Image: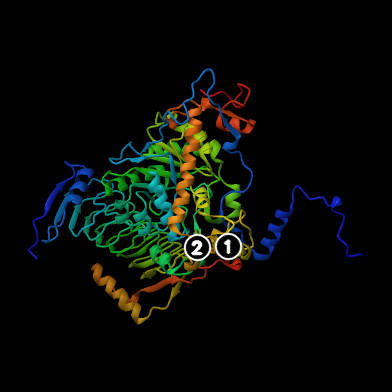
Amino acid sequence: MSGARAPVEFDLAVGDTRSLNRSLHDAAPDGGAPPRWRIRNPGGRHALCVGMDAEAALEVFGHVGYYCGGMNQAAHIVIHGNAGPGVAENMMSGSVRVKGDASQSAGASGRGGLLVIEGNASARCGISMKGIDIVVAGSVGHMSAFMAQAGHLVVCGDAGADLGDSIYEAVLFVRGSVGSLGADCIEKEMTDGHVERLGGLLAAAGVEADARSFRRYGSARRLYHFHVDRADEY
Amino acid sequence: MSGSPPDRRWLRASASFPAPVIAEIHRAADEGVYDIRGFGAKRPLPTFDDLLLLGASMSRYPLEGYREKCETAVTIGARFARRPLELAIPITIAGMSFGALGANAKRAIGEAASAMGTSTTTGDGGMSPEEREASKLLVYQVLPSRYGLDPDHLRACDAIEVVVGQGAKPGGGGMLLGQKITERIAGMRDLPVGIDQRSACRHPDWTGPDDLEIKIHELREITDWELPIYVKVGAARVGYDVALAVKAGADAVVVDGMQGGTAATQDVFIEHAGVPTLPAVRQAVEALQELDMHRKVQLIVSGGIRHGADAAKALALGADAVSIGTASLIALGCNRADYVEDYHALGTEPGYCHHCHTGRCPVGITTQDADLEARLDPEQGARRLRNYLTTMVLELQTLARACGKSHVLNLEPEDLAAVTVEAAAMAKVPLAGTDWIPGGSRE
């Protein structure tokens, strides 16, 4: 491996979203160190840094609109600002870090990788998640982890109403209060194995918190097969 | 009281409670849950059968049947995409999931569509390798569930279809019962094996047309503006939905009428939600015309399309292409009188089967059971579907030539008359033998 490359500077006050994403997609790996990019003046634009499919280190300085880092594969993206809806939606691998707050549907349907939100996340954080790991240093809004299928959602603050509604096999860790649990979501025992797993997630996210101070939530698996006497839970 | 049968002349059925209604009430009382089934609406509805094509006469010249060409090629998605789809025929294969269908069925459909120069479509659950390999032109669906959604598959497909709704259940999500969630299907969908899978009815990261516009922009950015993006809606508030899809940036709009099929949906949904395909076509065309986008944003119509005459009438009303789902499965052998004892085991007969949801398809199409699936030879299935599509195209061309058209897209509303007042009102074509269009004349 050669040493770290000098970062490529891209100013969205000059170039547009299309030229940025095209440049990112065209920057084929050359076998050396992963490319580095510094993206300035995002101005809340949508769909920045989407569809990355190679290792790269991207830093965005400012606030971003919808879907930043959408469907990311392998790249590591840091947003020095707040993120709009659907940040890192359907991420496959790599990581996205939001230094500020994130709007609703953060990490929606993500299938892999790590999403770290250093501030708070709004409603539906981790909705339909399918294997992604999400660590939120602050709190999350209502209906977070709705229909969550796989992966982990770690909330260091509080969770809003209806956490984990219709959850499948995703694992939720919450340190603060939970507004209410959604359909089929229950508190579960926090074993040493879970403490160890959570400790690993917090370390990977660079968030300092005592894993033993969290509670674990998951599926009661009562809705996996329809039963007439549970119809009112749907 | 004697035990002899009653004199049947004096048995009087209730119009409000005929035998099937009584049976359904008994079933609901026994089971406490709505009936879930496959196939599509079985109730009588206004269809394209209620329209007739007016052949050429003194005022129009027909084309010679076997001498003069009647073109069938259509281009889909040239509004924004760099690589629009070039279809040899205006008949495509609708989205049906791998999971609802077995791998052999998917392969057969892909090979038949490829041989005919048309596209096939994935479904809930993502793209299977068999399907991609067999399909020269593959439309990749982005559905509310996002099962198996993979950016590599987005980049590997030929067009993207954002599914907002489905004709069999507009406003509802899909379901795949546990017996069809095998290890492979569960793996593709990130679900536990054997559970009843409940698909969402709303996308997880957008709501409403303004968000959809941004979502479509994201998909274009991910695929570098190469691929056409369709928006599929279940026929309900068709005029608004089509207009909003256009506003959101769709290259093509798919309108699926209520006769559209499903692998598993509540019977009450199939029979009582949405609007029939016939009025949906006309409403969709009017919406495109009002925006001056007719023929610029292509309209693909599905939901109960059965033969070339249906296709001809849909095109005459202004569609750019039609899409078939159930009919393609019937061509593969659905409801064919083979393995009759297995139909009986399901409590049905060939010709009546709608048991896709059970995973016990007697002819090996809508199943994940290896033994049942082996009953469908993909090569033979592809040949049958190809034959059927060829027949449809010949029928379509025959009717178009008779109307004097050198291209099937030249068919027009003036080539149509209605045989019922309802169809005349829905399609806005004159009642046959009159100049009368109920509700006002076509502009």
Given the image, on which type of amino acid does mark 1 rest?
A: Tyr
Q: Residue at x 42, y 45 (%)?
A: B208
Q: Is residue A35 visible?
A: yes
Chain name for mark 2: B
Given the image, on which type of amino acid does mark 2 rest?
A: Arg
**Secondary-structure class at tag 1:** loop
Q: Residue at x 64, y 32 (%)?
A: B420
Q: Residue at x 53, y 41 (%)?
A: B307
Above or below, comparing residue B360 to residue A84 in the picture: below
Which numbered tag is attached to residue B375?
2
Please state which of residues A148 and A100 is positioned toward the viewer in this rendering.
Answer: A148
Q: Split into 4 quadrants, where in the image is the N terminus of chain B?
A: bottom right
Picture coordinates of residue B153, whole percent (x, y): 32, 55
Judged from this view, the residue extending furthest toward the bottom is A192
Please state which of residues B69 and A122 is positioned toward the viewer in this rendering.
Answer: B69
Judged from this view, the residue extending furthest toward the front is B67
Above or below, comparing residue B403 to residue B149 in the picture: above
How many angstroms separate mark 1 from mark 2 (CA)? Answer: 10 Å
Above or below, comparing residue A194 to residue B435 in the picture: below
Judged from this view, the residue extending furthest toward the top is B58
**In the figure, is residue A39 to the left or right of B352?**
left
Q: Residues within 10 Å of mark 1 (few under 14, many from 20)?
A: few
Q: Residue at x 12, y 50 (%)?
A: A9
**Is the Cβ of the residue at disc 1 closer than 8 Å to that at disc 2?**
yes
**Secondary-structure class at tag 2:** loop
Q: Which residue is mark 1?
A: B339
Q: Residues within 10 Å of mark 2 (few under 14, many from 20)?
A: some
Picture coordinates of residue A157, whole percent (x, y): 34, 66
Q: Is residue A159 visible?
A: no
